[in-house]
Image: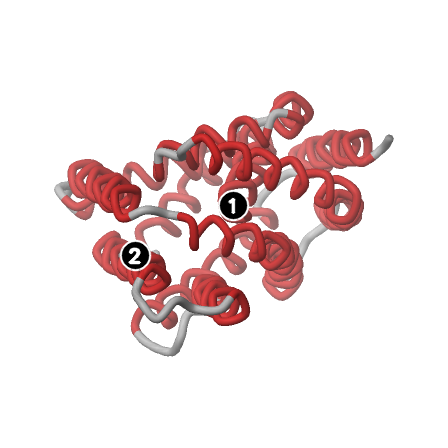
Amino acid sequence: MAGIIGLLLMGLALGGCSAVRLGYNNLPDIGYWWLDGYLDFDGAQSLQVKRALAGLQDWHRREELPRLATLAAQARDQARSEITPAQVCALSDAVQARLLALAVRAEPDATVLAQSLAPAQLQVLERKFGRINNDFRRERLRLTPAEVQDKRYDTFLDRYEDFYGTLDARQRGLLRQMVRQSAFSPEKLDAARRARQADVLALLRGLQQPPAATDAQARQRVHALVMRVFEPPPGEWRSQQDALAQEACNNTAALHAAMSPAQRERAAQRIEAYRQDLVALSGP
């Protein structure tokens, strides 16, 4: 549940401030229909999930939105001058910490839901994972390295121009070079996602097998999974994730340094509009 809301919040932030208030206020409904597409809830589960998502949003609105508004103010002020990779990473880590807090808050309700799932629902989930994997294979793994780079370049260009305005030829060339030199590997991402899917299915099936886990044991297993998602164990994917995180910090700082004062001010105003939405949403 926390993952769903976290992804939606990040998507709304990237998608435009005008969507934030409407999108946030409708997150319980959006989250419910998204989750139902993975698990096909029965009547009792539907009521439980809707109550849980509404309660999670109430807590998030009260406790977390003010913290996110503070982070937005920090980002706004930093956007008006040059920033270092360390500053970018610190802000990213702070946002990640807020998403982890959201996930931990959702754990009790997620555990109750996990314990209530029927074998048929796990089959629905497994088929959903299969469709997602097929889509990723078709959209990413069948592309040539050059096509993958072009796709990533277009995505990053849209995001940067949303904040800074139109990038000139020099700035676009810098972005193109960063994408070309990136450590990103769609194959490694696919392998990590499949491993995470298997981890989720193993957890859910394990909760159904006798002897039945106590509530405390089930909660402990769910928490362990959450922590593996946020802090992967040492290995190839952890190394790839760490490399990409540092790469993102370096690239963001370098691109920001290449922006004009007017572009930086536009970015600052863009973030300030987002901050104002967060403040308004957190109010009574």
In the image, 133 versus 140, the foreground residue is 133
Above or below, comparing residue 242 to residue 92 in the picture: below
| Image disc number at residue 214 | none
In the picture as drawn, the residue positioned furthest to the bottom comes out as: 234
Task: Judge the density around disc 2: few (<14), some (14-19), many (≥20) Cα neighbours within 10 Å.
Answer: some
At horizontal 23% and vertical 59% (from top left) the residue drawn is 191
Q: What is the basis of the colouring in this image?
A: secondary structure
The residue singled out by tag 1 in the image is 1
The residue singled out by tag 2 in the image is 201
At horizontal 44% and vertical 35% (from top left) the residue drawn is 157
In the picture as drawn, the residue positioned furthest to the front comes out as: 211
> How far apart are the two marked residues, 2 and 1, measured between alpha carbons?
16 Å
Q: Position of residue 257 (x, y in %)?
A: 61, 50
SS at circle 1: loop
Q: Position of residue 47 (x, y in %)?
A: 54, 33
Q: What amino acid is found at the position of numbered circle 1 in the picture?
A: Met
